[in-house]
Image (cartoon, grey):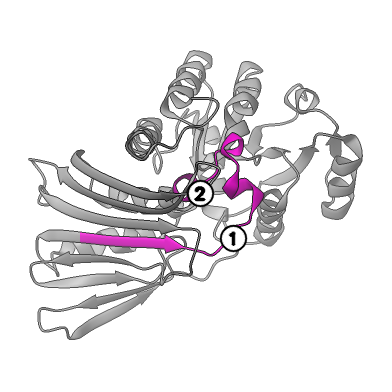
């Protein structure tokens, strides 16, 4: 699978480091960083020389027209995901799109419609959805060790109040699309259902983006044991948080060390006693699993990745639209 990357920033470099680390590892072969496109050719050529890419392009159109590109990785800011992904899809290219998928649900719906019309793979790169520790957490829930789930708390907070991509509404800035998206995904991948009540609060910057977010929601899932689950989520770009997630049930709790990149799980019983701990498998950067999911999808002729279905991507975007509407955060592309 030859990968072409749109955008030559830090996240593109992380993907390439992942590809390099995957070489020679059992079951992780067949994925190659092949082409890079940037807004100017000099930057693309520098990236290609540094990472050993075969092709460098000074326009995104040139990359998506390359017949040897099997998968396009969209590594530009949130604000640009829609036009860049649309460009690739219109040329029949499979796409792996960084989170947050687009600026809003309307853009997401349009890309999903186009991908299904073209019958090409489209996937969102929410790396926690693809990592094996996700199934480890699910297995603990399925065992019933903590009983009926009653409450989920999750927070993701990093101090970055001066970053341009955070402050500018034209770049879809704010805490929600950068950090809160992980908290929402954490809840939804274990506890699907309708968020029947959702109370949203935010502190806004002088540029009008959310800097300090709070979401409280109740999940309705009548046929599931988590019906009526309460979720309390926080995202913040003004301070450092513990970034943990905790699932509390009738008979205990599960603590996850990092909602953004979980590595360690602790399971506690009803008397707060530690029952056992679980660690994520040793891996590279953690991005390898989303790459492998796309490789396998292409090999099987799938147009979606089972770990992150497109309808679920849309549901997350719709929830984030609800939050922004409640809190008065508006992007130019809305």
Residue 129 visible, this angle: no
Magenta span covers which residues?
152-178
Query: Which mark is on residue 215?
Result: none
Where does residue 312 sit, x and y in percent of width and height? 35, 36
Query: Disc 1 vs disc 2: which is toward the camera?
Result: 2
Quarter of the image with the N terminus in it: top right
Residue 214 visible, this angle: yes
Q: Residue at x 65, y 42 (%)?
A: 75
Query: Which mark is on residue 26?
Result: 1
State the residue in front, 200 or 106: 200
State the residue in front, 70 or 230: 230
Q: Tell me which numbered mark, 1 or 2, is placed earlier along the sequence.
A: 1
The residue tagged with tag 1: helix, strand or loop? loop
Left/right of residue 228 with respect to residue 107 in the rendered view: left
Residue 333 lies in magenta, yes or no? no
Mark 2 crowd level (few <14, some 14–19, many ≥20, 10 Å Cα) = some
Left/right of residue 314 with respect to residue 160 in the rendered view: left
The residue tagged with tag 2: helix, strand or loop? loop
State the residue in front, 69 or 30: 69
Query: Which mark is on residue 205?
Result: 2
């Amino acid at each position: 699978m030859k990968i072409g990357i749109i955008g030559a920033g830090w996240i593109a470099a992380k993907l390439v480091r992942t590809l390099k680390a995957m070489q020679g590892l059992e079951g992780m072969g067949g994925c190659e960083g092949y082409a890079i496109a940037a807004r100017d050719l000099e930057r693309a050529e520098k990236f290609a020389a540094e990472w050993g890419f075969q092709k460098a392009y000074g326009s995104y159109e040139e990359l998506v027209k390359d017949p040897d590109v099997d998968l396009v990785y969209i590594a530009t800011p949130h604000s640009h995901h829609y036009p860049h992904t649309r460009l690739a899809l219109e040329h029949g290219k499979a796409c792996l799109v960084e989170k947050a998928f687009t600026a809003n649900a309307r853009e997401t719906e349009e890309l999903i419609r186009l991908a299904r019309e073209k019958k090409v793979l489209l996937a969102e790169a929410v790396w926690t959805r693809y990592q094996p520790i996700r199934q480890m957490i699910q297995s603990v829930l399925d065992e019933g060790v903590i009983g009926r789930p009653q409450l989920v708390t999750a927070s993701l907070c990093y101090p970055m109040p001066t970053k341009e991509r955070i402050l500018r509404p034209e770049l879809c800035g704010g805490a929600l699309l950068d950090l809160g998206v992980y908290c929402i995904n954490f809840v939804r991948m274990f506890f699907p259902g309708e968020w029947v009540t959702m109370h949203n609060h935010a502190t806004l910057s002088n540029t009008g983006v959310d800097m300090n977010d709070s979401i409280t929601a109740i999940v309705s899932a009548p046929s599931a044991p988590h019906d009526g689950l309460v979720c309390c989520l926080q995202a913040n770009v003004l301070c450092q948080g513990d970034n943990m997630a905790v699932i509390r049930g009738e008979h205990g709790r599960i603590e996850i060390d990092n909602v953004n990149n979980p590595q360690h799980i602790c399971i506690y019983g009803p008397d707060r006693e530690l029952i056992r701990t679980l660690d994520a498998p040793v891996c590279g950067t953690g991005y390898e699993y989303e790459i492998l999911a796309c490789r396998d999808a292409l090999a099987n002729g799938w147009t979606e990745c089972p770990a992150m279905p497109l309808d679920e991507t849309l549901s997350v975007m719709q929830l984030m639209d609800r939050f922004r509407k409640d809190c008065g955060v508006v992007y130019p592309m809305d």
